[in-house]
């Protein structure tokens, strides 16, 4: 298998407007920076200052959330250890054939290689980062979000999981968005300084908030960090800065507002339905039901109108206010912005995660359409998936790439006729090596393997 270097393009196009900090964001700034400063000095966030997010344990969260999860007896002992298969999957969900212990072992093996290649401590002795050598900057928000979700899930298999998670959290808190300080600046350079305006990217923040909810359930929130309080703060900031107030769809980041064209553009890899459900449970806020419905309605409409034969989604959808459609040209990244390309390749995994953990009929229908088509198109051979497709299914590249094939394994779990196809995809994921330049594919593959092996659980 030949891997391809993945180069995420700039989050905000040159010349796009940069907004001033929003009112609520300004109110959060002092708390967030206080937490970051305390973390850098002492390695803890408790006692960071009166009113700081990490210095309090709320009795309720948002508009009706429940109290935080109590800490386990031993501070670092996981409550949901990897390999316990505590998550409930929808009835009929497929698993790869073979021994469960062997499946788990393959995930742990991939995780250990991923950790050795990409987990770094280059920006302060108590801060960890996920290195992204195949991105346009060494540290990007997406990677830190991946790291927080992964380490909270792998606790029990890795005795250092909590230490790494807390180090990633310190790094995140030390790099607030210049527009919405409750969010994460999208990119940092080799000196660990935020660049390109220091504004946010939605996918990173969604995973950071979700990772904090996982950490609350995994370790409780009565230790050095109030994970739950920090999660609720970030969810509120996401609502303010990264959700379109009209369409309830995800924005590209907090840098776009109603006065520019990018406000009506949404990136399909940000359509994390399961995250929105978790935010609803954590906050009790029905706003997140509206967000979930808006995204599922858009997915169904895009599949029906623009990809009826394949179910594939475009990297970017434009015109979301009136007539949503795949980007007709380069909108943010490259001429394939309207194709199934380096962003949309994650959608079978993201929507599939929700399908198998929630059993929602809309998510199931969306990924079954994708899975049935790709299984037939390739004749059951993962090597024929390729790296990129038009929405009609034509290949855009002769390359093969795990970032495109691994997500289809999650979709295959919901495909009633997909057992042999799922087995073939699992074998490919388990057998394919990666290098220290393959951060993107290795990270996507690891998270797909966690779900496919039965180790995904929701906070």
Image: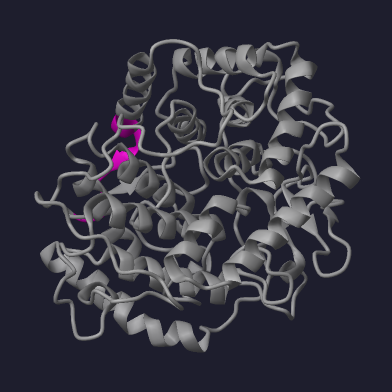
* Residue at the image position 40 percent from the left and 33 percent from the top: 455
Is residue 122 inside the magenta stretch?
yes
Total of numbered circles in the picture? Answer: 0
Considering depth in this image, is 59 or 152 the residue closer to the camera?
Answer: 59
Residue 265 in the image, given as x and y percentages of width and height: 74, 62
Q: Is residue 91 left or right of residue 27?
A: right
Residue 86 in the image, given as x and y percentages of width and height: 35, 37
Quarter of the view holding residue 381: top right
Write down the region rendered in magenta: 115-124
Is residue 327 inside the magenta stretch?
no
Quarter of the view holding residue 266: bottom right
Q: Is residue 346 above or below residue 244?
A: above
Q: Is residue 302 left or right of residue 144?
A: right
**Is residue 204 among the parts visible in the rendering?**
yes
* Residue at the image position 30 percent from the left and 32 percent from the top: 84
Residue 223 in the image, given as x and y percentages of width and height: 15, 62
Q: Is residue 60 above or below residue 82?
A: below
* Residue at the image position 66 percent from the left and 64 percent from the top: 14
| Quadrant, the N terminus | top right
Q: Is residue 182 above or below residue 141?
A: below
Q: Is residue 456 above or below residue 102?
A: below
Considering depth in this image, is 114 or 139 the residue closer to the camera?
Answer: 114
Identify the coloring: one colour
Considering depth in this image, is 414 or 244 the residue closer to the camera?
Answer: 414
């Amino acid at each position: 298998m030949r891997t391809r270097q993945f180069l995420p393009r700039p989050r905000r196009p040159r010349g796009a407007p940069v907004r001033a900090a929003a009112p609520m964001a300004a109110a959060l700034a002092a708390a967030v920076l206080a937490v970051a400063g305390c973390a850098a000095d002492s390695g803890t966030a408790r006692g960071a200052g009166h009113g700081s997010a990490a210095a309090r344990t709320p009795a309720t969260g948002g508009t009706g959330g429940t109290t935080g999860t109590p800490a386990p007896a031993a501070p670092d002992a996981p409550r949901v250890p990897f390999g316990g298969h505590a998550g409930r999957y929808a009835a009929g969900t497929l698993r790869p054939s073979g021994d469960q212990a062997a499946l788990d072992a393959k995930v742990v093996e991939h995780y250990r290689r991923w950790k050795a290649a990409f987990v770094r401590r280059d920006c302060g002795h108590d801060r960890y980062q996920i290195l992204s050598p195949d991105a346009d900057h060494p540290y990007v928000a997406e990677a830190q979000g991946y790291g927080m979700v992964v380490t909270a899930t792998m606790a029990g298999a890795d005795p250092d999981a909590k230490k790494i998670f807390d180090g990633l959290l310190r790094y995140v808190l030390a790099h607030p968005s210049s527009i919405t300080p409750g969010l994460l600046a999208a990119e940092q350079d080799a000196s660990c300084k935020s660049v390109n305006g220091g504004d946010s990217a939605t996918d990173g923040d969604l995973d950071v908030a979700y990772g904090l909810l996982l950490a609350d359930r995994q370790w409780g929130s009565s230790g050095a960090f109030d994970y739950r309080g920090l999660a609720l703060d970030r969810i509120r900031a996401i609502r303010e800065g990264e959700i379109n107030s009209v369409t309830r769809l995800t924005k590209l980041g907090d840098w776009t507002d109603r006065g520019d064209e990018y406000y009506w553009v949404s990136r399909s890899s940000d359509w994390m339905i399961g995250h929105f459900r978790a935010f609803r449970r954590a906050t009790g806020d029905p706003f997140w039901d509206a967000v979930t419905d808006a995204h599922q309605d858009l997915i169904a409409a895009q599949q029906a109108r623009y990809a009826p034969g394949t179910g594939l989604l475009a990297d970017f959808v434009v015109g979301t206010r009136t007539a949503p459609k795949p980007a007709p040209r380069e909108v943010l990244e490259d001429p394939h912005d309207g194709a199934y390309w380096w962003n949309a390749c994650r959608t079978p995994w993201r929507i599939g995660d929700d399908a198998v953990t929630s059993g929602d009929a809309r998510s199931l229908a969306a990924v079954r359409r994708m899975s049935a088509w790709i299984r037939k198109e390739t004749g059951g051979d993962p090597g024929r998936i390729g790296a990129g497709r038009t929405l009609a299914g034509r290949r855009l590249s002769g390359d093969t790439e795990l970032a495109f094939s691994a997500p289809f394994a999650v979709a295959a779990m919901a495909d009633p006729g997909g057992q042999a196809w799922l087995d073939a995809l699992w074998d490919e994921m388990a057998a394919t090596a990666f290098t220290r330049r393959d951060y993107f594919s290795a990270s996507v593959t690891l998270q797909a393997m966690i779900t496919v092996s039965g180790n995904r659980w929701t906070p």
